[in-house]
Amino acid sequence: MSRLRVVFTTLTGLFSSLPVFADIGIDEKINIAVKPYADAVAATVFSSFTVGGVDIPFVLVWLIVAASVFTVYFGFINLRAFRHGFELVRGDYHDPKAPGEVTHFQALATALSGTVGLGNIAGVAVAVSLGGPGATFWMILAGFLGMSSKFTECTLGVKYRDVNPDGSVSGGPMYYLTKGLAERGKLFGKLGKVLAVIFAIFCVGGAFGGGNMFQANQSFSQLVNVTGGEHSWLADKGWLFGVIIAGLVGLVIIGGIKGIARVTSKIVPFMAVIYVTAGLIIILLNISEVPSAFGAIFAGAFTAEGISGGVIGVLFQGFKRAAFSNEAGVGSAAIAHSAVQTNRPVTEGFVALYEPFVDTIVVCTITALVIIITGTWDPGVDPSAGVQLTSQAFESAISWFPWVLTMAVLLFAFSTMISWSYYGLKAWTFLFGESKVTDTVFKILFLFFVVVGSSMQLGSVIDFSDAMIFAMAFPNLLGCYFLLPVVKRELNEYWADYKAGRLVKTGNS
C-alpha cells in the first residue's frame, strides 16, 4: 500500500504541474534543446541514397531485403503455414500446461495492438497522396514479405525467452541476441551482448515516443478536431485528456502482460470491427467505383504518370508505409509473442504471420481504398495531416462518420500505448534488472509521458523516438541472419510432426 501511495503522490505532483509548464512554453524550450541531437539521430537512422531522383532510407531497404531473404529461405512460409497459423490462433493446439502467460490469440492481439494504430489511418492517407493509388500495391507486397520477418523474430523470441520462477516471461530480441549468438562462440557472444544493449536502449526510447507521446498527441488532436477545432472546449486541455488516458493506461499495465492481454484480446477485435466495418460501408456505398480503384492501383504501381519520382517514388511510398505500420523486422512484436504458452517456439512464428496480414494487407488496404474511392487524396498533403485527410474521406460519405473514426483513433492509440508499455518495460528491466523498483519507476515515467504527449508539441522529441523505433531493426535483423539455421531446424522438426499427424488437437476441431 505504501508503494502505491508513493506512486500516486508522484504522479499527482507531475501531472498537476503540466498546465503551468505549458503556459511558460517549456515544450518549446525542450524542442530547442533537443532538436540538434534529435535531428542528428534521425538523420543517421534515416540516412538515404538516391534512386531515380527519390531519396530511399537505408533502413527501409534493410527491412525489405531481410523480409525477402526470409521469405525465400523458409520456402514462402507466409503462404504454406497460413492455414495452420489460423488453427493455432483459434486454440486447436493450445496446451494450458505449457510454460508462458497468455494464449496464442492473446499474444497476437497484444502484438497487433502495438502495430494496428494511427499509422494505418494517417500514414496510409499520406502514402496514397504522395505516391498515388499505385502505392497501395507495393504496400500490400511489402506486408506479404513482412509476414516472414515476423515469423522469424517471433520464433526466436519464444526459443530464447527466460521463464522466471514466478511463471512470468521475459523475451524478445534482447534475449535471442545474447543467448542465441552465444551458442555460436565467444566472439558471437560478445557481439550479441552489444547488439542486445543497443536494441534495448532504442526500444525504451521508442516506447516513450512513438509508442506513447505520438499516440497521445494525435488522438487528442483528432478529438479536438471533431469537437470544434480551435473553438473546442478541449482545445487547451491536452493535459486533462492526458491525465485521463494515463489513468486508464495505468489501470491496465499494473496487471502486467496478463492484464494487457485480457484488455487487448477484447479491444483489438472490437476496434478492428469498428474501423473495417466503417471502411467497408463507404466502399459498398461506392461499389461502382471499386473496379476503377483497383485499376488505378495496379496501373499506378508500374506507370505512375504524373507522380513525383515515377515508379520508384510510388514503390517507396508503399513499402515505407507497410514497413512503418507493421514493424516487421523491428523486433518489438517478438517481446509480446514471447509470453505465449507453448513448448514449440515455431508455433508462435506461425501465429505471427497474421500480424502483417491484418495490419497491412487488410486494414491499410481498406484505408487506401476509402481514400482512393472518395477522391480525397491530395499530392500536396502535409505529412502531419494524415488523420484529418482520412477523416475528410469518411465525412465525404456520411457526415457523422468522423465520430466513428475518432472512436477508432482513440482505441488504436490506447491499445498501442499499453502494448508499447510492455515492450519498453521488458527492455528497461533487461538494462536495469528485474525488480519491483525498476518496474515501478518505468511505469511512472511511461504514464508521465502520456500526459506530456497530450499537452505539449514535442516535435523533435517524437521524431527522435520514431527514429529509435526503426533503429531497432539494425541490431535485430543482424542477429536474425546469424540465427536463421536455428529457426529452420525448429521449423523442419515441427512441420514433420504436423504433416505426420503426430500433433494432438486440444481445442476446437
Image (cartoon, rainbow, N blue to C red):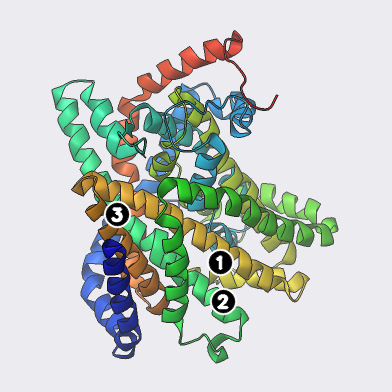
Mark 1–mark 3 distance (CA, rounded to whole Å) = 23 Å
* Most distant residue in the front direction: 1
Figure check: 45 above or below 10: above
Look at 53% across and 15% down and name the residue there.
Answer: 495
**Is 492 displayed left or right of 223 in the figure?**
left
Query: Residue 410 has which mark?
Result: 1
Looking at the picture, how far across and down is residue 14, in whole percent?
29, 76
Q: Amino acid at mark 2?
A: Leu
Q: Nearer the viewer, residue 352 or 280?
A: 352
Q: Residue 169: in sight, yes or no?
A: yes
Q: Amino acid at mark 3?
A: Val
Mark with earlier residue (3, 2)? 3
Mark 2 = which residue?
A: 223
Element carrying mark 2: helix
In the picture, the disc for residue 480 is none
Q: At 22% from the left edge and 33% from the top edge, which residue is drawn? A: 192
Q: Which residue is mark 3?
A: 204
For the point 31% across and 80% down, the residue is 27
> Is 459 in front, or is 161?
161
